Amino acid sequence: MTAGGNNDRFMSDINVTPFVDVMLVLLIIFMVTAPMMMQGVDVSLPETTSEPLNSEQEHLVITIDKDNKVYINDYQVTVDFLKEKLAKILEGRRDREVFLKADKDISYGTVVQVMAEIKGAGVEKLGMVTVPADFDKDSKTQKANQ
């Protein structure tokens, strides 16, 4: 008498768990990279050696271009009304997080003035957007380390 039964049978079912895992990983990758494909205001960002941000949702981005024009996402605003407009936009949001993209050729004073307006609107977290140091501007890809 054997306990536990006969374990010598072959299993004829297909295990689809690895296929589902791969598809979910691909779905997450495409969901994260899709917002990065959008075009916005053309800005020459400063270069740093920081890690990229993980983006799970569309963020509020303030952009200062080389002509000192200020944009909320893709809509141009004046610096005088930036605080008011941001306060109105942030009224309906749970997260009070904003990212700042500034052209590397504009003055430091302009960036600080815009940062003060952003903080004055009640923003809790202000992030600076930069480009990795080994980013090739013309081909929009990173250079290979040689």
Image (cartoon, helix red, strand yellow):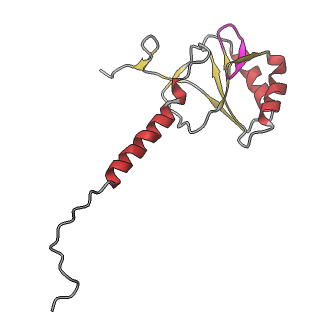
**Would residue 117 be visible to someone looking at this image?**
yes
Residue 137 in the image, given as x and y percentages of width and height: 47, 13
Q: In this view, does 19 lie to the left or right of 108?
A: left
**Picture quadrant of residue 144:** top left
**Would residue 51 be visible to someone looking at this image?**
no
Seen at 80% across and 22% down, the residue is 82
Q: Is residue 34 left or right of residue 129?
A: left
Q: What stretch is highlighted in magenta?
A: 65-73
Residue 16 in the image, given as x and y percentages of width and height: 32, 54
Residue 107 in the image, given as x and y percentages of width and height: 68, 12
Magenta stretch contains residue 71 = yes
Seen at 50% across and 31% down, the residue is 50
Q: For the C terminus, which image quadrant?
A: top left
Seen at 37% across and 19% down, the residue is 143
* Main SS category, magenta section: loop
- Using the image, determine if residue 29 lies above or below residue 66: below
Residue 35 in the image, given as x and y percentages of width and height: 55, 29
Q: In this view, does 71 lie to the left or right of 10?
A: right
Q: Which one is in front, 16 or 99?
A: 16
Magenta stretch contains residue 4 = no
